[in-house]
């Protein structure tokens, strides 16, 4: 059985669970021994990254690499399109989430434990997240090139980031401009059972974690 090292609140661990659910794979999920980044955990996963996967003799510690590996080893349902240009689009969407959308959200994390954010910073990050969503809608969610009635590797990270944006909007008074095409895209991907199940599980964990912080 596949073993996943993860923590419940991790966005990237949730991203991996969507893929596992969609493919109907069985897995066991463990917390990193000694905690995230600990010396004990690094004896198993040298980088200390989460999520990490152990599959037989193979150990991997990057969500994107794990996703590509599992999609090749367990090709049904296939999560990359057959057409080369559509595969590129799916990968582009995934990379854009990991390197552009999520990092703008992450810049707000220092302020969710009660540290008073500067109003200018909140306004700036609201604008930056809105810009990234607009860019995503322009280059990667063209109706002719995106979705195509299947969940792809490019669609696994975005739903959880959207949940984070929802949660932080009232908390930090964000002002996010959601393009109509992103709203439509979100509605579509949330119809997939794997996405819906992960969101149903993840959202209360996130909300409880936010409430537990000393604000």
Image: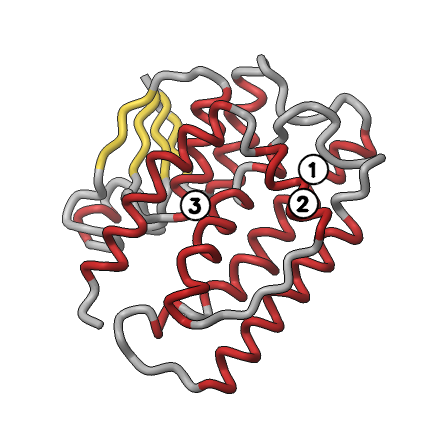
Between disc 3 and disc 1, whose residue precedes? Answer: 3
Mark 2 burial class by Cα count in 10 Å: few <14, some 14-19, many 20+: many
Mark 1 burial class by Cα count in 10 Å: few <14, some 14-19, many 20+: many
In the rendered structure, are the residues bearing label 3 and label 1 in contact, judged by CB atoms less than 8 Å apart? no
Q: Residue at x 21, y 64 (%)?
A: 213
Q: Nearer the viewer, residue 161 or 207?
A: 207
What residue would you read off at disc 3?
Answer: 12
Q: Quadrant of the C terminus?
A: bottom left
Say what secondary structure mark 1 lies in: helix
Q: Residue at x 49, y 82 (%)?
A: 121
In the rendered structure, are the residues bearing label 2 and label 1 in contact, judged by CB atoms less than 8 Å apart? yes
Determine the residue located farthest toward the left in the rendered image.
34
Q: Residue at x 54, y 37 (%)?
A: 156
Q: Nearer the viewer, residue 208 or 194?
A: 208
Color encoding of the figure: secondary structure
User: 99 left or right of 203?
Assistant: right
Mark 3 burial class by Cα count in 10 Å: few <14, some 14-19, many 20+: many
Q: Quadrant of residue 178?
A: bottom right
User: 155 left or right of 45?
Assistant: right
Q: Residue at x 39, y 27 (%)?
A: 58
As displayed, is residue 22 above or below residue 178? Answer: above
Say what secondary structure mark 2 lies in: helix
Cα–Cα span, label 3 and label 1: 17 Å
Q: Which mark is residue 170?
A: none
What residue would you read off at disc 2?
Answer: 93
What residue would you read off at disc 1?
Answer: 90
């Amino acid at each position: 059985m596949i073993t996943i090292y993860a923590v419940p609140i991790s966005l990237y661990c949730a991203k991996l669970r969507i893929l596992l659910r969609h493919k109907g794979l069985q897995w066991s999920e463990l917390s990193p021994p000694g905690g995230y980044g600990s010396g004990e955990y690094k004896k198993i996963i040298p980088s200390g990254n989460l999520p990490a996967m152990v599959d037989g003799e193979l150990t991997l510690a990057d969500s994107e690499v794990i996703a590509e590996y599992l999609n090749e080893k367990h090709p049904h349902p296939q999560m990359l399109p057959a057409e080369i240009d559509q595969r590129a689009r799916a990968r582009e969407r995934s990379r854009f989430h990991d390197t552009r959308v999520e990092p703008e959200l992450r810049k707000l994390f220092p302020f969710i434990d009660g540290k008073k954010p500067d109003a200018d910073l909140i306004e700036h990050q609201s604008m930056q997240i809105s810009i990234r969503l607009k860019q995503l809608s322009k280059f990667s969610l063209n109706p002719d090139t995106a979705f195509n009635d299947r969940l792809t590797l490019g669609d696994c990270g975005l739903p959880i980031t959207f949940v984070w944006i929802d949660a932080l909007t009232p908390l930090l008074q964000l002002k996010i401009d959601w393009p109509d095409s992103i709203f439509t895209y979100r509605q579509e991907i949330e119809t997939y059972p794997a996405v819906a199940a992960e969101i149903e599980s993840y959202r209360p964990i996130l909300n409880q974690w936010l409430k537990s912080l000393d604000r």
